[in-house]
Amino acid sequence: MRIGIIGGQSTPSFIKNKESLEIETKYGNIYIQISRLQEHEIFFVQRHGEKSNIPPHKINYRGNIEALAACHVECIFSLGTVGSMKKSIAPGDIVIPHDFIDFTKHRYYTFYDDSRVHIDMTNPFCPFLRNKLIESSEKISSIKMHKNGVYLVTEGPRLETPAEIRYFSEFADIVGMTLIPEITLAREKEMCYASLCIVCNMAAGLQQNMLTANEISVMYKKLEKNVSKLLQITIESIPDIERNCECKNLLSGAVL
Ligand code: HPA
């Protein structure tokens, strides 16, 4: 199967002997690293651009997904860092979200600007990929995994205020900046999409000290090895057969 990985920080360590490809899309050129894992072809995209320097609100989300679609990728695992809004979710934990709330403001949300296409979001994350991640996490004893969670997406690049977090935490569990519109665009291409959220901090107002971007990246580096192992075991557990979930037919009920 052709499997995409969108990473927010470093390249997972199992991506070896890679070939780099520059894909031209109408949204700009995208760099993809191609490698193999067992029978699967793996397509890795650095979400923040080749130099990893594009802020969340400026990411070329459409370019990234269009390039993966051009490579006939069927499934995407998305890696991202988040803050926790719940006491039961601690820095160092991993959350596999099952739903989201969108508080972004100025992004390009769709590939369909000239026609009416309304993609269903009843099950925004692919249940098959989520299950594979959850099952695989049970094989790594040092991972504390949360099998569900609501991800609230903010516009960024600033972090949130304590009042915002009090408000958001009524309805959601984790907060981050990059899920939207990545997930929607992947669904518009009928791809399966699941997100592996790495909890790097308690959200604003829920920890004693001020939040720093450095703190987030230091925590990510600590967890990087486990995240890469989890992803590798998960991908190795995916059979190389035709997909059997609703994701592959999303457009059939969406076009007016
Ligand atoms: N807020 C938003 N995005 C984040 C956070 C946070 O606390 N931590 C990591 N990404």
Image (spheres, grey):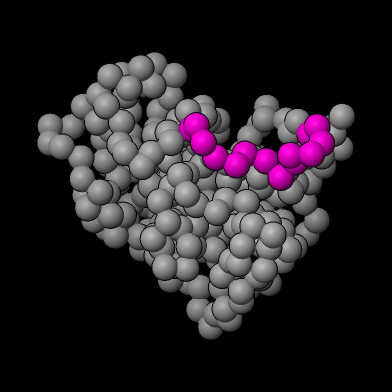
Q: Is residue 230 visible?
A: no
The N terminus: image quadrant: bottom right
The C terminus: image quadrant: top right
Q: Residue 164: image x %, image y %?
A: 32, 22
Q: Residue 143: image x %, image y %?
A: 36, 49
Magenta region, main secondary structure: loop
Q: Quadrant of residue 184?
A: top right
Q: Is residue 18 above or below residue 174?
A: below
Q: Residue 2: image x %, image y %?
A: 69, 64
Q: Is residue 112 visible?
A: yes
**Observer-nearest of 238 and 167:** 167
Q: Is residue 162 above or below residue 1?
A: above
Tally the marks. Answer: 0
Q: Is residue 206 above or below residue 10?
A: above
User: Magenta span covers which residues?
Assistant: 104-117
Q: Is residue 87 left or right of residue 71?
A: left
Q: Residue 26: image x %, image y %?
A: 69, 59
| Residue at point 48%, 32% (across, down) | 104
Q: Quadrant of residue 162?
A: top left
| Residue at point 45%, 44% (across, down) | 57
**Observer-nearest of 198 and 46:** 46
Q: Residue furthest left?
A: 209
Q: Is residue 156 left or right of residue 178?
A: left
| Residue at point 36%, 21% (across, down) | 169
**Observer-nearest of 91 and 78:** 78
**Observer-nearest of 162 and 77:** 162
Residue 105 colored in magenta in the image: yes
| Residue at point 62%, 47% (across, down) | 193
